[in-house]
Amino acid sequence: MDVTPIPGAALGAVVHGAHVTGDMGEARSEEIWAALDAHLVLVLRGHEPPSYEEFLAFGSRFGHIPKTGLTSGAHPDHNEILIVSNLVEDGRKIGVGNAGWMGWHTDYSFRPRVAQVGFLEALEVPSSGGGETLFTDMYALYESLSPEDRARLHSYRVRHALRTGYEETIEEELQGEVSLGESTARNQPEDGTSTVHPLIARNPRTGRRSVYISTLNTERIVDLGPEDSRTLLDELLSHAGKPEYTYAHTWRPGDIVIWDQLGTVHAKQPFDPAERRVMRQVVSIFDDPAGPWRAEVAA
Ligand code: OGA
Ligand code: MN
């Protein structure tokens, strides 16, 4: 396995020769963790394409893999695996998502137990281009703030609610399958589509702090009035997509991208809807749900 930082990119490295299976040794998984801590986004290439079971087992080495909670759009035998695709076959969407722009978000921020690592694999990519996935470093945003601003932000809490564009699927086909209630209690890993988290998260592996918000799924800073909340969120979110903090991944079939979900937000570029784009995704969540919310006091 070798790790090569992506030339000219603010974050991201290419990893050649990983074994995308569950049975890698501890030393190997620690090597991947270390690369992830350093680069935040890893592009796996030159590996044997994993089976669905291997993909899931590989992800499980990096935290707990919750079910998606969807009754369609997930793999029929492995609900933990999300199919992201614009395709419609026999009158049914084969997965979730579409060919449009997907705004900045981090997966499962609307659940009490948030995402730790994302794993996305390209099975088919549009030949005419588009459909790149973008990642912006949110640790860098925190680290760019003055000590005064950091201290203020540490006192705020934020309401997150599901707004990825997948709720349409939930409303029409999955009614009742995903709790729409608010839950801050420690529940099942799949629980909740709305919740409140501190504004500042802390990566329990590295101690780095990130501004944990997004465009799609962040509703409001609950400690501020609606206007002040909107102004501050807009100001902070203007960071997302800035080239100096962003890596844009152009997919090749077989690529697996894994990323730090606590310290980055991601988005997807539009593509020609007449093209085929098929991805599979799993997401790990923190084994300890309180892990990212410890040490909320600024260092
Ligand atoms: C998602 C997502 C990115 C992509 O489905 O949550 O972030 O490139 N998809 O399809
Ligand atoms: Mn996502």
Image: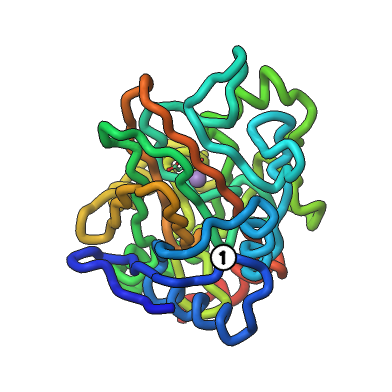
Q: Quick check: 221 above or below 23?
A: above
Q: In the rendered view, does 209 fall on the left or right side of 116?
A: left
Is residue 181 visible in the rendered image? The answer is: no
Query: Dot 1, crowdedness within 10 Å: few (<14), some or many (≥20)?
Result: many
Q: Quick check: 223 above or below 166?
A: below
Q: Amino acid at mark 1?
A: Val
Q: Quick check: 29 above or below 232?
A: below
What residue is drawn where x is 34% and y is 69%?
13
Q: Classify residue 173 by image quadrant.
A: top right
Q: In the rendered view, does 240 fall on the left or right side of 169?
A: left
Q: In the rendered view, does 150 fall on the left or right side of 115?
A: left
In the foreground, 149 or 111: 111
In the foreground, 51 or 291: 51
Q: Classify residue 54 by image quadrant.
A: bottom right
Q: In the rendered view, does 102 fall on the left or right side of 6?
A: right
Count all numbered tags in the image, as a single digit: 1
What residue is drawn where x is 32% and y is 52%?
249
For label 1, the residue is: 20
What residue is drawn where x is 32% and y is 30%?
271
Q: Position of residue 20 (x, y in %)?
A: 56, 65
